[in-house]
Image (tube, grey):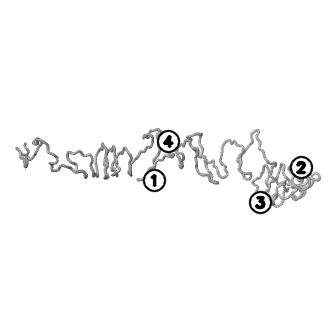
Amino acid sequence: MPATTGTVITTGDSNTVTNTMLAGSITNAKLANSSVTLGNTALTLGATITTVAGLTSVTSTTFTSNVAVGTAPLVVTSTTQVANLNVATAGLATYATTANAVAGANVSGTVANANAAVYISTTDSPSSSSNCSLVFSLGSGVGQTLYQDTAGLIYKPSTNTLYTTNFVGTLTGNASSATMVQVDVLGSGTQYILLGSVGMGVGQTPMTYSTLVYTSSNNTMVTNINGSITTNTITTGSNVTAGTITGNWSLSAGSRLNATYADLAEYYEADAAYEPGTVLEFGGDKEVTIAEDSTIKVAGVISTNPAYIMNSLCLGTHTVAIALQGRVPTKVRGKIRKGDMLISGGNGFARPAKTSPMMGTVIGKALENFDGEGVIEVAISRM
């Protein structure tokens, strides 16, 4: 067909121009609609377009190449993985409404309802034998800032082991290579229940010994023990602190009990307070009173440091330990020679007998020479 202007009518006109009717091409500029606008970008027909600006939403089942963000925020909706989400410095991708996984570089901002697996290690595998630092936040909920602990809390995935230089709180399981388990700060007078284990070494299960109690203020330990005890000293902590031994005890062959002091004494109730070394007799308002001269009712001498005392449950305002046997410091007066039998000289003193003493008057025998009024040791033996 030659070049024609105006209306073209063909044989069998069907109001349609087909490719076979055209000998050449019609340029895009000759068309009434030679471009299409996408977003705020005009796409010229037949041209190569590399950038589209002004899009607010892109929906696709799969993104297979890079998605770049321009000057305006971009909402990306996808049901499969976004291979590379390239966020430029201008125009940040504010959020993705749906994403099963985001792989690649860092994600900045808030991610809601996400399960995150974070591995900070020389490798990026939870089965690695490398040590991994932990990531934590100061609070809970959306929008918390994450921090990496690099000081002393290390996790080793291959052995599922957590390492730290200091642990405070309740521990369930084994703590290996621990040099100290601090239960509490020792307070004055506070009592503590001790912990122990069946064996020694790492990995032992701790057990509580509820009957083994330690008191920090006096550094003492109290417990009930069944079986043998091997020790050099058993003490109440002080020579004025009373203690109790319960049971029927016997000394084994070759064993003995040694006493520091020398006499055997027994408690009696006296009618007044008397000093050690005083000679007493049976009588008065109570059991014993101060002895009269030459009395035949001699009870004995009040012990200074008895080695063994009987009748510890004796009651009364004034109780005295009277020596029954042994050597005892005794108040005496007169001229005394070793071996002299001593009787009561009155007012709580002993004196030498002038003649053979009567039964019931003898206190004991002098163990040293003496002349005057004072205190000497006497071997007590009531006669």
SS for callout 2: loop
Task: Give the crowd class for mark 2: few <14, some 14-19, many >=20 residues within 10 Å.
Answer: few
Which numbered disc, 3 or 4, marks the residue closer to the eye?
Answer: 4
CA distance for labels 4 and 1? 24 Å
| The one of 340 and 167 positioned closer to us in this rendering | 167
Q: Earlier in the sequence, mark 1 or mark 3?
A: 1
Quadrant in the rendering for residue 321: bottom right
Mark 1 neighbour class, 10 Å CA radius: few under 14, some 14 to 19, many 20 or more: few
Residue 122 spot, x, y in % from top left = 45, 40
Secondary structure of the residue carrying tag 3 is: loop
Quick one: label 3, few (<14), some, or many (20+) residues within 10 Å? few
> In the image, which disc is placed on residue 139?
1
> Residue at the spot x=42%, y=45% of the render?
118
Of circles 1 and 3, the one toward us is 1
Local crowd at mark 4 within 10 Å, few (<14), some, or many (≥20)? few
Q: Is residue 232 left or right of residue 26?
A: right
Amino acid type for the residue under numbered disc 3: Thr
Q: Amino acid at mark 1?
A: Gly
Q: Mark 2 vs mark 4: give the one in front.
A: 4
Of marks 2 and 4, which one's residue comes earlier in the chain? Answer: 4
Tell which circle, 4 or 1, labels the residue nearer the N-terminal end.
1
Residue 57 pos. (x, y %): 28, 51
Q: Which residue is mark 4?
A: 161
| Residue that carries the numbered disc 2 in the rendered image | 368
